[in-house]
Image (cartoon, rainbow, N blue to C red):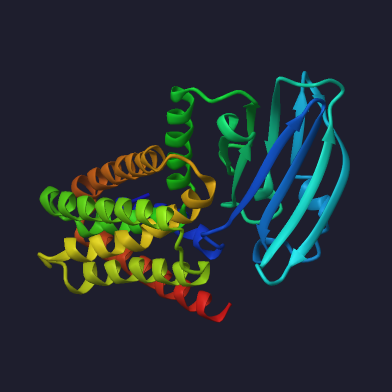
């Protein structure tokens, strides 16, 4: 396959996930009292599959200890229309009191592939946060105070996985790599984007303000379309880094949406996300500068422009 064909194929694989909701997050809390465990789930009503019952949804969540599954002894779910939430409370019982619990979380299999579940376990000094997604389905939860190393590793890992599992970020990074025709322009745009993203992610999580998911997805779609249009019609714009900074602010709200309610340390979560994005952008930039010609650049830009506008239109109508 010719080089332009490979580039277009790769772009198509990245574009494909954009049809799903890009901001799909639920929250849970797990507590342990001897051999009994209590679990609460808070999931937006918009993420609950139509026709799915409580048993089907909670079937994607399970607890184990010492190689044996915990037995679910109670389950009660309800819809809170005022808050737009689907609420569940479940009780589990182990054969004996565990010191640690193996958690299986596969909500992505009953909602959308890029669904993220933020689980808070324990109380007070023993509180831990674990982020589950399609790349991280099982984890061992210890009901002991987390060490500093565990806190750092958990935050960095959660941020990196969030970046890799975010189609809106990957699409924009692809457009950003196209826009940086030379190293200097790419570095300026990338630095401005990451700085804007970090500032808004930290501020948004601190103040607890995040726009509705529908608005965020529409705005993210427009950032992809706008940058692709600049590649096509304003290829030599010297002030593109200003636009990249503004677009970074929009994408920073996606991080804030996960970071705020999770109560994870912002400095570690954001660092993990930005480091992962910088690495992806470095790889894309290398391919762009060394291997992609003008013809392939314009083909991919047209594809991104069409996808961004189509995605925006879908979110306006749904």
Q: Position of residue 290 (x, y in %)?
A: 19, 45
Q: Residue furthest front?
A: 124
Between 4 and 297, which is closer to the camera in this rendering?
297
Between residue 10 and residue 118, name the one nearer to us. Answer: 118
Q: Quadrant of residue 246?
A: bottom left
Q: Is residue 44 left or right of residue 275?
A: right
- Residue sitting at 35 percent across and 58 percent down? 172
Viewer-side residue, 238 vs 69: 69
Report the residue at 36% width, 51% height from top.
202
Instruction: Evaluate whether residue 171 shows in this view.
Output: no
Quadrant of the rendering where the C terminus is positioned: bottom right
Q: Percent x, y for residue 150?
A: 48, 25
Residue 13 seen by the camera: yes
* Residue at left offset 40%, top offset 66%: 220
Q: Most extreme residue toward the right, as rendered? A: 73
Provide residue 61's location: percent of width, then percent of height: 74, 42
Vertical placement of 124 versus 263: above or below?
Answer: above
Q: Quadrant of residue 48?
A: bottom right
Q: Is residue 136 above or below residue 293?
A: above
Residue 289 left/right relative to 312:
left
Question: Looking at the image, which residue is at 23% across and 43% down?
Answer: 286
Instruction: Name the residue nearer the viewer: 85 or 303.
Output: 85
27 left or right, relative to 296: right
The x, y position of residue 285, in whole percent, is 24, 47
What is the number of callouts on the image?
0
């Amino acid at each position: 396959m010719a080089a332009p064909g490979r580039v277009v194929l790769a772009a198509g694989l990245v574009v494909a996930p954009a049809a799903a909701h890009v901001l799909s997050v639920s929250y849970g809390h797990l507590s342990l009292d001897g051999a009994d465990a209590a679990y609460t789930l808070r999931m937006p009503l918009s993420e609950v599959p139509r026709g799915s019952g409580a048993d089907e949804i909670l079937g994607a969540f399970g607890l184990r200890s010492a190689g044996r599954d915990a037995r679910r002894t109670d389950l009660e779910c309800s819809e809170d229309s005022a808050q737009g939430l689907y609420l569940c409370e479940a009780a589990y019982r182990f054969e004996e009191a565990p010191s640690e619990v193996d958690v299986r979380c596969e909500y992505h299999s009953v909602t959308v592939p890029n669904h993220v579940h933020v689980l808070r376990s324990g109380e007070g000094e023993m509180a831990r946060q674990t982020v589950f997604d399609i790349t991280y389905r099982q984890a061992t939860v210890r009901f002991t105070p987390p060490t500093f190393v565990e806190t750092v590793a958990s935050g960095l890992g959660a941020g990196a996985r969030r970046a890799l599992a975010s189609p809106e970020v990957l699409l924009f990074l692809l457009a950003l790599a196209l826009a940086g025709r030379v190293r200097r322009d790419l570095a300026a745009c990338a630095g401005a984007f990451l700085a804007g993203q970090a500032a808004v992610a930290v501020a948004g999580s601190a103040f607890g303000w995040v726009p509705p998911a529908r608005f965020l997805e529409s705005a993210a779609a427009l950032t992809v379309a706008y940058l692709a249009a600049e590649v096509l019609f304003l290829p030599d714009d010297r002030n593109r880094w200003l636009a990249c900074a503004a677009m970074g602010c929009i994408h920073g709200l996606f991080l804030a949406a996960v970071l705020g309610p999770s109560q994870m340390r912002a400095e570690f979560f954001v660092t993990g996300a930005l480091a992962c994005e910088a690495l992806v952008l470095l790889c894309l930039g290398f391919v762009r500068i060394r291997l992609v010609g003008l013809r392939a650049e314009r083909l991919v830009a047209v594809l991104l422009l069409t996808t961004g506008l189509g995605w925006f239109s879908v979110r306006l109508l749904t």
